[in-house]
Image: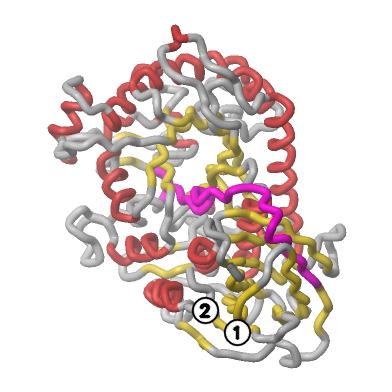
């Protein structure tokens, strides 16, 4: 993307309900307001640490509350299309440019049987949702999910039932989705109107299997390992090219799973839910930092327990093992506060402080791009979600906008950066400025993501680029709100608290003032 041209982003955000507040060219941000703290960032453009997977910007929908029914799908509504998909929601999801969509769970995977959700809808059984309550018509199933994924341009990511389901059932699901021949389930997919295989690449083996409260039976990691090998064999024999995500969210189970399954584990799953444990907004960032520590710990386990190259599997497996190092799949992440409504309190109102937390999370994913291979926000609509609906309308919550901004602007290769700044009060030395830096594949654009997590203090950030020369002015894309407590709600659907601006930084010795509680993504061209 040309760093001096914000128009594509502005158009997408405006379509999502965000008015473009201002596009202006300013010589510098210095002098606008007094009492700013000094900070500095030195970016080492020549020190590429890792490729940033585009899959870190994924999403997730589950058969839970109003995530699907009344969320993405509401047949008979004047807002829905011929498939029953809410057009207003679809437009907002499309604007996120989601590269990956996870389905059908989540915890509900443990009682979900995919064959209930195929064929004529009038013939599909209505099942009680024994995990989340209520009934499921199964009118959204595999083919509907694939259609939705195609409409939003996302690769599908399916989790299989390892609790009440069988390895044969999972294998047949792979056949239904990926086989191109005359076998029974390939023919059945064609009979249902889908001639071409879906070619689903990403398959999760279970979900949070260590959770004894759920309907799972694999709390002992040794039991999971034994069953996962059997599932993997039958699924890989259907399609040797699929990639497998193993559970690993329980830190006590992860070592056993990594040691035993690493020859076929492309990813190990990690679930990260942050919260605001006390009244101080800064406590949210402490929670996010704790989640980043879990990434570091899992990365260390991967390094200690899995060889980068596992070597070939015996030819009698009849399918190949993993081809690259094991990566982390953060296939559920987000914010889970105790004050929600709806099913299990999962319909949550997110403030601007949560949006700052989203940016901090995404910065962490970029900083650990060497090991974080994918991430899916949990969930897309209504439940812990960036998009909320009622029968008449839909809105974008505050957290929607950093998700869109990062997806639009971030580079594809993480580069090293040195940061000097103060700390947040009421935290244990947590930096007030959170930073991630990246360049594009061609090495022509530097992108610097800055999050001023202070509720009240502005930051004057001195910028230094080492290892390359810059060309032309910097462009700053900023998101902010009147306060960290501001929120978008369905009660005031026409009021959007989020403000988006662009400015230019033309000084020969660039610095940028990041206002309090602001996300700023700075871009500059690099000389050839």
Q: How many marks?
A: 2
Earlier residue among tags 1 and 2: 2
Residue at image location 40% in from the left, 35% down from the top = 201
The residue singled out by tag 1 in the image is 504
Is the residue marked by circle 2 packed among few (<14), some (14-19), or many (20+) residues within 10 Å?
some
Numbered disc 2: secondary structure: loop
Q: Nearer the viewer, residue 118 or 448?
A: 448
Quarter assignment of residue 96: bottom left
Which residues are drawn in magenta?
A: 40-65
Picture colour scheme: secondary structure
Res. 6 in view: yes
Q: Is residue 62 left or right of residue 150?
A: right
**Callout 1: 10 Å neighbours few (<14), some, many (20+)?**
many
Quarter assignment of residue 423: bottom right
Q: Give the x, y percent position of residue 424.
A: 82, 67
> In this orientation, which residue lies closer to the viewer: 9 or 423?
9
Q: Is residue 41 magenta?
A: yes
| Mark 1 touches mark 2? (CB < 8 Å) | yes
Say what secondary structure mark 1 lies in. Answer: strand
Expressed as whole percent of the image width and height from the top left, the position of residue 381 reads: 42, 57
Q: Residue at x 61, y 66 (%)?
A: 446
> In terms of depth relative to the viewer, which is nearer, 291 or 266?
266
**In this rendering, is residue 473 above or below 51?**
below
Q: Which residue is mark 2?
A: 4
Vertical placement of residue 184 versus 487, above or below: above
Please identify the quarter of the rendering in which residue 395 is found. bottom left
Q: Residue at x 21, y 37 (%)?
A: 196
Q: Is residue 410 left or right of residue 140?
A: right
Q: Could you say where residue 82 lies in the image, as x and y percent from the top left?
A: 17, 57
Check if residue 250 falls in the magenta segment. no
Give coordinates of residue 331: x percent, y percent: 53, 42
């Amino acid at each position: 993307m040309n760093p001096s041209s914000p128009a594509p982003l502005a158009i997408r955000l405006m379509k999502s309900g965000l008015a473009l507040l201002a596009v202006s060219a300013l010589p510098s941000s210095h002098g606008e307001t007094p009492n700013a703290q000094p900070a500095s960032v030195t970016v080492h453009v020549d020190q590429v640490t890792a490729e940033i997977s585009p899959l870190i910007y994924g999403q997730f929908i589950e058969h839970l509350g109003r995530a699907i029914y009344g969320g993405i799908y509401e047949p008979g509504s004047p807002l829905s299309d011929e498939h029953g998909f809410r057009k207003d929601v679809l437009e907002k999801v499309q604007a996120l440019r989601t590269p990956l969509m996870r389905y059908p769970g989540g915890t509900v995977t443990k009682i979900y049987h995919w064959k209930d959700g195929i064929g004529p809808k009038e013939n599909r059984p209505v099942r009680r949702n024994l995990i989340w309550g209520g009934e499921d018509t199964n009118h959204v199933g595999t083919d509907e999910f694939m259609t939705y994924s195609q409409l939003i341009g996302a690769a599908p990511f399916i989790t299989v039932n390892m609790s009440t389901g069988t390895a044969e059932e999972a294998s047949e699901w792979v056949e239904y989705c990926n086989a191109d021949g005359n076998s029974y389930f390939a023919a059945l997919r064609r009979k249902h109107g889908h001639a071409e295989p879906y070619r689903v690449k990403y398959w999760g083996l279970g979900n949070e299997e260590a959770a004894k409260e759920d309907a799972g039976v694999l709390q002992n990691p040794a039991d999971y390992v034994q069953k996962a090998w059997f599932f993997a064999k039958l699924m890989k024999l259907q399609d040797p090219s699929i990639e497998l995500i193993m559970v690993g969210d329980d830190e006590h189970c992860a070592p056993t799973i990594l040691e035993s399954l690493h020859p076929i584990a492309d990813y190990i799953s990690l679930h990260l839910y942050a919260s605001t444990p006390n009244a101080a907004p800064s406590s949210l960032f402490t929670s996010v930092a704790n989640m980043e520590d879990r990434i570091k710990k899992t990365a260390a386990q991967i390094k200690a327990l899995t060889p980068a190259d596992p070597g070939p599997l015996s030819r009698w497996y009849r399918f190949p093992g993993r081809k690259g190092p094991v990566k982390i799949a953060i296939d559920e992440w987000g914010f889970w506060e105790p004050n929600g409504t709806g099913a299990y309190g999962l319909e949550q109102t997110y403030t601007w402080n949560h949006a700052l937390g989203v940016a901090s999370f995404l910065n962490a994913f970029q900083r650990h791009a060497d090991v974080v291979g994918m991430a899916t926000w949990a969930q897309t609509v209504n439940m812990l979600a960036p998009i909320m609906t009622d029968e008449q309308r839909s809105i974008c919550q505050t957290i929607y906008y950093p998700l869109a901004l990062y997806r639009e602007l971030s580079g594809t290769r993480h580069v090293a950066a040195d940061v000097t700044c103060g700390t947040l009060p009421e935290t244990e030395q947590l930096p007030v400025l959170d930073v991630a830096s990246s360049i594009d594949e061609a090495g022509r654009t530097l992108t610097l993501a800055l999050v001023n997590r202070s509720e009240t203090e502005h930051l004057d950030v001195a910028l230094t680029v080492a290892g390359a020369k810059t060309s032309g002015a910097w462009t700053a894309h900023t998101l902010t709100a009147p306060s960290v407590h501001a929120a978008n709600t369905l009660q005031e659907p026409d009021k959007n608290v989020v403000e988006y601006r662009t400015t230019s930084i033309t000084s020969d010795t660039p610095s940028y003032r990041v206002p309090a509680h602001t996300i700023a993504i700075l871009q500059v061209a690099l000389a050839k």
